[in-house]
Every structure is written in C-alpha cells, then in structure tokens.
Image (tube, rainbow, N blue to C red):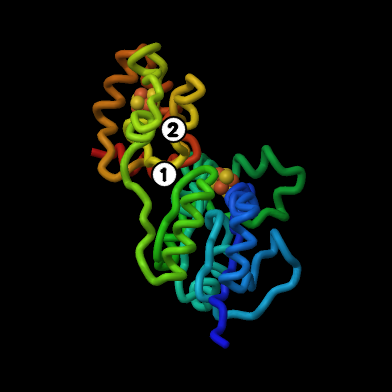
C-alpha cells in the first residue's frame, strides 16, 4: 500500500483565522483526510506524528527569537513549505510595531514587561527560510487553500489568479463603489481571492489580500486624494493587515 503524504500545519504569531479556514472546509476536509495523513495540526488534534512532512502549511509571522529558531526547524522537516495568510506572507497587522518603539509598547501593554521576550519587528516567514508558495489573504480563501493543497499533492504549481479585486468585481457584476458612490477602495491594487466581498456589500476593499503583481499604487493614491482623502488618511488605509507588503509596493 502506498503511503499517504504527510500534512503539517504550524502556527506562529497569528490569530488562528487562517487555520480556521482549513477547518471551515468541512465536507472537503473529509475528502482531504482520505488523501493525506494529517500528521501535525495542534488546532485540530493533540495527537501528532513525527516528521519529516511532505507539505507544511505555516500560519503567522516571526516576532520572537524562539519563532526565528523554530521556523528553521520546521523548514528542515518539510519537503514543501507554503505560507498562508497576511501574517505569514507579510508580517500581518502586528508588523505595525516595525514603525514604532517596541519597548514603549511593551511597557504600556504588559503589567510585567520583564516576562516579554520579543523581536523589534514582525517579519514574514520568507524573511527567514525559503518558501515554496505564498497564499495571501486575511484570512485566506478556503477554495484557494484547497487548490494549493491539491496542486502540491499532484506535483504542479497552484492555479491562483494574480489579478486584482477589480477583476472579481467585474466578473460578478458588482457596481463599482468608487465610480458610482466615490467610496475609497483598494481593489485596483489588491490581489484577487476574496471574490470582491466588500464591494458586493457597498464597501470599499480594505486590501486584506495584499498587493497584486505590479500594482499601480501611484495612480490609486492620486485617485484617493481626488475623492477627498488627506495624506495621513491615505497612509492609514494602506497600513493594515499587509502593511509591510503595501509599503514595499509603494516605494518608488
Ligand atoms: S492573516 Fe489574518 S486571519 Fe490569518 S492568522 Fe493572520 S490575522 Fe488571522
Ligand atoms: S469597487 Fe473597488 S474593487 Fe470593485 S471595481 Fe471598483 S475599485 Fe475595483
């Protein structure tokens, strides 16, 4: 009998939302469990099987010296390593600390700061080890996750669109909130994947899936200002879940 591929799911600094997207697969998860051995997934089971693992899904960013050591160990025992979500691919909303004084935050937030051991930055997994594929989103989309897992099980590249949220709006026939109502929207520069969820509820896109390939942030910034956003407001709208990725994309 051929051995089932071993799947591992790892958590670093994160809210667990992306692991929940995997659990949220429900029916598909049963089919998946028939195809792979879910060998390490502490969110779902306390029982673990020793590595090496054929596919590791990594959620979360590196924020402590222990994280930095542990991700190297995860890489050593993983044939393929895929990062899932804004935390793992861009440092997450916790990367806002990269722009402030960490010691000041620690002294304000924690009653006993002496017990806190933290790095000054929150960084994506790719800043520490080689990554085979990055799946974007906050949280990730479960259909895209299933496509990525299936692709790696069959030894092919995942078929994930690299276009913008605007394309998803057009495909579902959603009226553009920016053109119709003057609502600021990050859709023109944001990676597709959510199915244009926010515009379908008459809200602008918040950029949860991070920058698309070659985003034209200069044009969008100009348009946001035409719609009445001040310079600080534009800065804030780009500085959320994918702050480091959008910062890099906006550099000249
Ligand atoms: S990317 Fe978003 S949903 Fe996923 S773990 Fe990070 S904060 Fe949670
Ligand atoms: S609502 Fe936003 S995402 Fe949709 S087409 Fe308009 S600008 Fe693009």
Disc assigned to residue 196: 2
Residue sitting nearer the eye, 194 or 112: 194
Question: Image quarter for residue 111?
Answer: top right
- Badge 1 marks a residue whose secondary structure is helix
Name the residue rendered at 30%, 25% in the picture: 221
Q: Which is nearer the N-term, disc 2 or disc 1?
A: 2
- Give coordinates of residue 8: x percent, y percent: 59, 69
How would you rate the neighbour count of disc 1 (Cα within 10 Å): few for under 14, some for 14-19, many for 20 or more? many
Q: Residue at x 49, y 31 (%)?
A: 197
Answer above or below: position of 134 versus 81: above
Residue 186, quarter of picture? top left
Examine the rendered structure and indicate whether residue 66 appears above or below residue 251: below
Q: Residue 141: give x, y in percent of width and height.
A: 51, 46
Mark 2 C-beta closer than 8 Å to ligand 2: yes
Residue 123 x %, y % = 47, 53
Judge whether residue 97 can be spotted in this image: no
Give left or right: position of 193 versus 49: left
Identify the residue at horizontal 60%, vertical 54% (top origin).
22
Residue located 59% across and 80% down the image: 51
Q: Is residue 98 left or right of residue 191?
A: right
Which mark's residue is nearer the viewer, 2 or 1? 2
Of 86 and 199, nearer the camera is 199
Q: Position of residue 64 (x, y in %)?
A: 58, 58
Q: Is residue 81 above or below residue 99?
A: below
**Is residue 119 shown to the viewer in this render?**
yes
Residue in the foreground of this view, choosing between 185 and 120: 185
Measured in 3D between alpha carbons, the distance from the residue under mark 2 to the one under mark 1, in whole angstroms, is 22 Å
Kindly check if marks 2 and 1 are in contact, taking CB atoms under 8 A apart as contact: no
Residue that label 1 marks: 244
Badge 2 marks a residue whose secondary structure is: loop
Q: Quadrant of residue 28?
A: bottom right
């Amino acid at each position: 009998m051929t051995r089932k591929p071993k799947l591992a799911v790892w958590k670093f600094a994160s809210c667990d939302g992306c692991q929940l997207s995997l659990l949220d697969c429900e029916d598909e998860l049963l089919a998946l469990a028939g195809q792979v051995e879910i060998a390490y997934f502490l969110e779902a089971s306390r029982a673990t099987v020793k590595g090496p693992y054929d596919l590791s899904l990594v959620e979360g960013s590196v924020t402590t010296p222990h994280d930095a050591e542990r991700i190297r160990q995860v890489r050593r025992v993983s044939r393929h390593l895929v990062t899932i979500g804004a935390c793992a691919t861009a440092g997450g909303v916790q990367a806002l600390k990269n722009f402030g004084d960490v010691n000041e935050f620690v002294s304000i937030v924690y009653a006993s700061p002496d017990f806190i051991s933290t790095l000054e930055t929150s960084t994506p997994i790719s800043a520490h080890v080689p990554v085979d594929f990055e799946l974007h989103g906050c949280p990730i989309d479960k259909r895209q996750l299933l496509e990525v897992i299936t692709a790696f099980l069959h030894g092919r590249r995942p078929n994930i669109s690299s276009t913008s949220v605007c394309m998803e709006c057009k495909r579902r026939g959603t009226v553009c909130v920016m053109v119709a109502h003057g609502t600021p929207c990050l859709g023109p520069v944001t990676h597709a994947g959510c199915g244009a969820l926010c515009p379908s509820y008459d809200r602008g896109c918040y950029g949860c899936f991070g920058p698309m390939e070659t985003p034209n942030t200069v044009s969008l910034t100009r348009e946001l200002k035409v719609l009445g956003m001040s310079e600080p407001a534009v800065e804030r709208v780009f500085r959320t879940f994918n702050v480091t990725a959008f910062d890099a994309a906006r550099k000249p």
